[in-house]
Image (cartoon, rainbow, N blue to C red):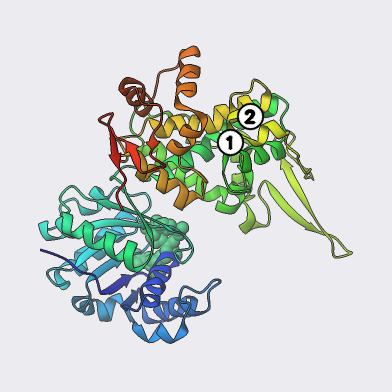
Amino acid sequence: MSRKIESVAVLGGGTMGTGIAGACAQAGHRVLLLDVDMSTAEAAMDRILNGRPPSLEDPEKASLITLGSFTDDLHKIADYDWICEAIIEGVDAKRALFDKFEPLRRDGSVVSTNTSGIPLHSITAGMPERLRSDIAVTHFFNPVQVMKLMELVPDTDTTDDVIDAFAEFCGGTLGKGVVHAKDTVNFIGNRIGCFLLLSGLHKAKAALDDGLSMEEIDALMSGPVGLPKTGLYGLFDLIGLDIMYLVGKNLAVNLPAGDSGHDFTSLPATEQAMYDSGQLGRKTGGGFYKMIKHDDGSRSKEIYDVATGAWRPAVDVELAEAHQDAAGLMFGDDAQGRFVWNLMGGALLYAAGLVPEISNDVVNIDNAMRWGFAWRKGPFQFLDTLGPDRVIAKLEADGQPLPVMLQILKDSGADSFYRVDGGEFLGLDGAYHPMKG
Ligand SMILES: NC(=O)c1ccc[n+]([C@@H]2O[C@H](COP(=O)([O-])OP(=O)(O)OC[C@H]3O[C@@H](n4cnc5c(N)ncnc54)[C@H](O)[C@@H]3O)[C@@H](O)[C@H]2O)c1
């Protein structure tokens, strides 16, 4: 059966549901937006039109959106092609809603869940065969109207035409960067991105003991390695320590045994104390950084020094010229270089060990990190910049095992993950393959 998505029933008008509903209406498609009751659905519509930024750029297209409640209007989903579940992150709540709507949707429609952490197979276990073949995870990133990445994850029995329909609609119509991921914990972007962040808090301790400041750590973990200027601590402030605390808890339960991420699922003691006292980040007026407004109207930035447990003025950092370049920095034998090799290099090696576990190829991993976490280069593009031979030589000299993709590269005699100006990538079989699309 060939499937086509032209209309969307969004179930749940929270942060993600309003983003998805707005994006679909903006693209000119009919949307049914249902929530627990009519007033909650109306409040969702208000955020679609008046949020910052609004999810619908063109208010005239609001007429494409019909509102309703789960109690009175769920039967209306029979008139829509894509049933897009975006309610709270809870397996019982999601399964309860699936039980209610599955008999009501029409044959040929497709279903998705927006879970960010629940394995798809736990949502669909014991569900009717039709649902298990028609469903995928559509993992959009927040805010939907801004973020390019959408991770698409099939269940074991999902048919190819369903995946094709989602890829065509989300990629073609909504203009998202579709990444094909597997039903593994945190999929691709958050698996690698959260490993970098959580391991960062732990690895930074040794760097601070080595004489680095927190501002230096943020300066190193931004421009020189192609990450956003928030760096490490600044990104925690943006996301919130509470969210990262929960991510760590979920990883502790769902990471495979033996995964090196298990070493970093808890917050270090100082950061745990910050969490306990509600010092979570921008949303609580300060986490690692806060802005101070002075009587004369001027503003200054303070940093919570995790070494002393006290606030102090933040200091601007100028990195040495040689440390503006990733290879110069990471292969250098000084405190800054050792730290970045340990943290950024550790994340690159972690990613290089996750094929085929989380993705069948390097391309989807690189795209996920560029589109979801604004890395200038994905992990494999980054390894190409460093020189995989040089990385392998360093690991071998340090007596470290090679992660699977570096081992494949070495065994096949290749010297990069991409060649022909990015037109071909190195596959799991050790041969180069043309890029799709
Ligand atoms: N917010 C993010 O950054 C983000 C990013 C990616 C994926 N997700 C995932 O998207 C989904 C929705 O997240 P969100 O941030 O939009 O949540 P939200 O809290 O903003 O909205 C949740 C929605 O669920 C409804 N709801 C609450 N309890 C319910 C119940 N028992 N039954 C049915 N509906 C109920 C609420 O009325 C609301 O519309 C979650 O699975 C979440 O993990 C969130």
Which residue occupies the extreme right position in the image?
296
**Which kind of residue does numbered mark 2 sit on?**
Lys
Number of dots carrying numbers: 2
- Residue displayed at 38% across by 26% down: 406
Percent of width and height locating residue 53: 54, 71
Q: Residue 140 sits in which quadrant?
A: bottom left
Percent of width and height locating residue 417: 39, 34
Mark 1 Cβ and ligand 1 under 8 Å apart: no
Pointer 2 local density, CA inside 10 Å: few below 14, some 14–19, many at least 20: some
**Which kind of residue does numbered mark 1 sit on?**
Leu
Q: Tell me: 63 left or right of 239.
A: left
| Residue 268 seen by the camera | no
Q: Residue 132 sits in which quadrant?
A: bottom left
Up the image or down, 228 lies above or below 344; here it is: below
Name the residue beneath numbered marker 2: 205
Q: Quadrant of the N terminus?
A: bottom left
Q: Are marks 2 and 1 in contact (CB under 8 Å)?
A: yes
Considering depth in this image, is 408 or 131 the residue closer to the camera?
A: 408
Numbered badge on residue 201: 1
Secondary structure of the residue carrying tag 2 is helix
Q: Tell me: 314 left or right of 48.
A: right
- Residue displayed at 50% across by 36% down: 266
Q: Tell me: 221 left or right of 294.
A: left
| Residue 91 seen by the camera | yes
Considering depth in this image, is 349 or 205 the residue closer to the camera?
A: 349
Percent of width and height locating residue 43: 46, 78
- Residue displayed at 32% across by 78% down: 29
Percent of width and height locating residue 226: 57, 43
